[in-house]
Image (cartoon, grey):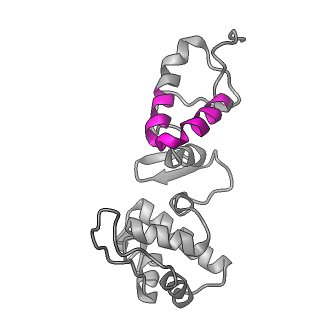
Amino acid sequence: MTSSERKTGVQGATVAANVERLMEEQNLNPNSLARKIAEIEQPTELADGTTVRPSKLAPLAIHRIIGGERKVDVDDLVLLAYSLGVSPVTLLQPRTPRGTDQILSPLGEITSGKYWNWIVGQTAFGAKRWHPRAEPVHPDERGDIWEQRMYVMEATPPWSAEAGEAAWQDMVWDFDKPFEE
């Protein structure tokens, strides 16, 4: 199958490449990965009592995912990540040596670092400005910081607010200190 025949988009191709790479690194083939997935005890009932079917990935399905012939749904993504010993966002992130490398995402071209920060909920994709940790923020730019803070607050679970606030203290200039140019 050529790249023009893929049934997946840019993100699906990234997930496929990462699954294939991790399988090679761990000396797994579709059969052994399918066995690992089959061993996961999945719930069959939701909290509200609704019955759900556990996800299964047969060796042929894994082969088709790697070949771009089959899309990965969110249940598949979680099972693949768990079985490969990585986070689901690891499968979503294109593998690059540096965060400054340009990648193609489903939303266009962006640096690998900015894309990672977006998929982990640390910054808004397409925000007006990017404020790297090393640069102090001028008081005139606080509106953009407020947009970023609101994004992080909405992108993370409510119980993580304390952790998110601690991360923000590392990422932006302390508003109580005078701006130094």
* Between 98 and 44, the one nearer to me in the picture: 44
Instruction: Provide residue 141's location: percent of width, then percent of height.
Output: 54, 17
The residue sitting at the top extreme is 178
Instruction: Provide residue 17's location: percent of width, then percent of height.
Output: 53, 70
Instruction: Provide residue 56's location: percent of width, then percent of height.
Output: 40, 81
Up the image or down, 34 lies above or below 71; here it is below
In the image, residue 152 lies in the stretch drawn in magenta: yes
In the image, residue 20 lies in the stretch drawn in magenta: no
Quarter of the image for the C terminus: give it.
top right
Task: Name which quarter of the figure residue 137 lies in.
Answer: top right
Instruction: Provide residue 102's location: percent of width, then percent of height.
Output: 57, 48
Q: Which residue is drawn at 43% across and 47% down?
A: 108
Up the image or down, 20 lies above or below 74; here it is below
The residue sitting at the bottom extreme is 31
Up the image or down, 176 lies above or below 162; here it is above
The residue sitting at the left extreme is 50
Up the image or down, 6 lies above or below 165; here it is below
Quarter of the image for the N terminus: give it.
bottom left
Task: Name which quarter of the figure residue 69 lies in.
Answer: bottom left
Q: Residue at x 48, y 72 (%)?
A: 79
Total numbered circles: 0
Q: Residue at x 68, y 25 (%)?
A: 135
Determine if residue 21 is in view: no
Task: Tell whether 45 sits left or right of 19.
Answer: left
* Between 166 and 14, the one nearer to me in the picture: 166
Secondary structure predominantly adopted by residues drawn in magenta: helix
| Residue range corresponding to the magenta coloring | 147-169
Determine if residue 104 is in view: yes
Q: Which residue is drawn at 29% across and 62% down?
A: 48
